[in-house]
Amino acid sequence: MAMANASVLFTPLISNKFVCYSSLQSYNDIPSTMPSLSRFVSRGCKLVGCGSAVPKLQISNDDLAKIVDTNDEWISSRTGIRNRRVLSGNENLTNLAVEAAGKALQMAKVDPDDIDLILMCTSTPDDLFGNGPKIQKELGINKSVLAYDITAACSGFILGLISATSHIRGSGFQNVLVIGADAISRFVDWTDRGSCILFGDAAGAVLVQACNPEEDGLFSFDLHSDGDGQRHLNATLQQSEAGNAFDPNGSLLDFPPRRSAYSCIQMNGKEVFRFAVRKVPRSIESALSKAGLSVSSIDWLLLHQV
């Protein structure tokens, strides 16, 4: 996976405001020299509900100390983490996502059949072909609304939010369900103390709803990717040695292809840390500049845990 840094500025959920950044606040702001624009151009977006879900199994730092050479003080002092949740038994990512989505809809007082689009942001789906349509089915939605996955690892949920606002403004959707969910434990090397202490499983969801321009809440965003960072953080596809056929002369053929599976997460923690402390502040400053705000005007700074 490539490294990515992203910053989004928006008013808090309790004010029910979240909107795509735009310098056009109303139709009156459109210069007369501009060509005819979509009737959706001045639509805003707001957050009207949120929900979350976690697995039942809780793994403490002391539990990990029984597997790898570490202890609670070492982990908590460096990461702030004391416990993490991990899927077990019959639990799966789809169920977590559905639970989180249901809570978001309940808070928003929106019926599942009123959803126009589902964005499932995950890098660890239960199905290689995607989890979005399965979420649609499990929520009991009777109409065939569009549902698809966004694969962007840690930045997936932010990209889902920006995609939701784009769909509302550009396609006229009214209610977009954005879910961020991952079962990272499936790809963790639990003998690698440098990475196993950081990851767990969970799901979160928000309902993004169209609104009038006056209710707009998203002031700006700043998104970037760096493909060179893939060497420091990845879980690559690997082929098994078995599975190929031999021709009559005993030579190994390239068909049928060998079975493949994703490796455990490989992470150079020091390089990821350097990337974060170098790039994230710049991204925040850029988002602030676009919004015309100063650092002193920010009440909450919500950053990636690691």
Image (tube, rainbow, N blue to C red):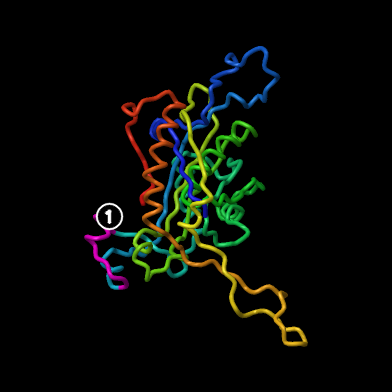
Q: Judge from the rendering whether residue 241 lies leftward or rightward of residue 230; answer left or right.
A: right
Image coordinates for residue 92, horizontal then vertical, percent = 49, 63
> What amino acid is found at the position of numbered circle 1 in the picture?
Arg
Looking at this rendering, what residue extends furthest in the top direction? 32
Residue 17, how many percent across, how many down? 45, 30
Instruction: Report whether 239 appears left or right of 108.
Output: right
Residue 255 lies, in percent from the top left, at 72, 75
Farthest-out residue, left: 73
Pick the residue in front: 255 or 165. 255
- Residue 129 image position (x, y, % from top left): 63, 59
Question: Is residue 20 depicted above or below 272 in this figure?
Answer: above
Q: Which of 185 and 86 is in front in this view?
A: 185
On screen, residue 161 above or below 191: above
Residue at 34% over, 29% down: 295
Q: Residue at x 60, y 31 (%)?
A: 169
Boundaries of the magenta span:
67-82
Horizontal placement of 40 versus 90: left or right?
A: right
Secondary structure of residue under mark 1: helix
Name the residue carrying label 1: 78
Instruction: Indicate whether residue 78 is drawn in magenta.
Output: yes
